[in-house]
Amino acid sequence: MLVVRNLISGYGSIAVLKAVSLHVGRGEIVTIIGPNGAGKSTLLMSVTGLVAPFEGAVEFEGRDITGVPAEKRVGLGCVLVPEGRRVFATLSVRENLEMGAYPHRKLRGNGLGPAGYFSALSRRRHETQRDLERVFALFPKLKKRERQLGGTLSGGEQQMLAIGRALMSRPALLMMDEPSMGLAPVVTAGIFKTVLTLREQGLSILLVEQNARRALTVADRGYVIETGQMVLEGTREELLNNNDVQRAYLGKDYSAINE
């Protein structure tokens, strides 16, 4: 589904990523772990088109999208849940979610005529409502706070809202940047349970996460990135049992046998 080939990317004249390659298959959860400043967020932003790479290629569903603008990548099904949630604080929960549906709500004339236009408009509204119901089924708390302003939600509720907004775009690949950041352990557990549920519903997921232990327990495969380079890759079991990964990211007393 997603193939990144020898990506060199960064800001200004500074290359943060140094010939990074990875792939995500259909229906997989793939995680990227590594220390702060290793280039994890830069990688996601390069895949989504928010940062233009210096060299290399990004392919999605067999198509080279390296030069495709970020907003069009969303329409193709390549969607990011950003670090820090970034909900619209002055909009209600429902309005935040409807913003996520924008790529599918635009109507163009195309000679439809008045009757055809209003028929298409009605169909889009029905589809948006169906997508809202799907999000509310996944996150019942958001339904209860449908009219509440996004900025007044708790951190966990804002993370639910950020994920829900991304789902309104109907992604095929959902990328998540540090979804557990700043959340209590019980809320984090709920977020990762949601990740597994989304995979069961057919989504492919690329997960960047500082909590390596949590990330590896839900992932099928993973990559370790350090100073802008992929230094290790493997299945969940291979990374959980790797001595270097255990020392650097899982804690010296970690034992995969007990997971």
Image: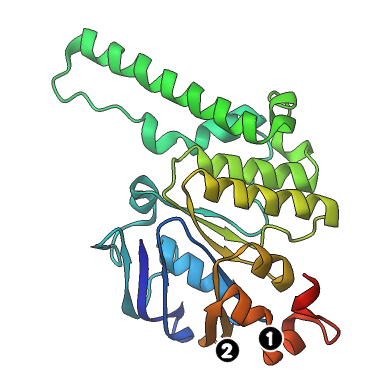
**What residue lies at 40% left-to-right and 63% top-to-bottom?**
25
Query: Does 208 sit above or below residue 21?
Result: above
Q: Residue furthest left?
A: 111
* Residue type of the residue flagged with mark 1: Val
- Residue matched to label 1: 245
Which residue lies at the image location 69% right of the left edge and 92% below the top edge? 244
Q: Earlier in the sequence, mark 1 or mark 2?
A: 2
Residue 121 in picture, x, y percent from top left: 34, 17
Q: Residue placed at 55% from the left, 66% from the top?
A: 220
- Split into 4 quadrants, where in the image is the C terminus? bottom right
The N terminus, quarter of image:
bottom left
At a point 53% along the width and 80% down the height, the residue shown is 234
Q: Is residue 62 left or right of residue 81?
A: left
Helix, strand or loop at disc 1?
helix
Judging depth in this view, the residue of 164 and 214 nearest the camera is: 214
Residue 174 image position (x, y, % from top left): 50, 53
Mark 2 — residue? 227
User: What is the C-alpha distance between the residues marked 1 and 2?
Assistant: 15 Å
> Compared to 253, does 76 lie above or below?
above
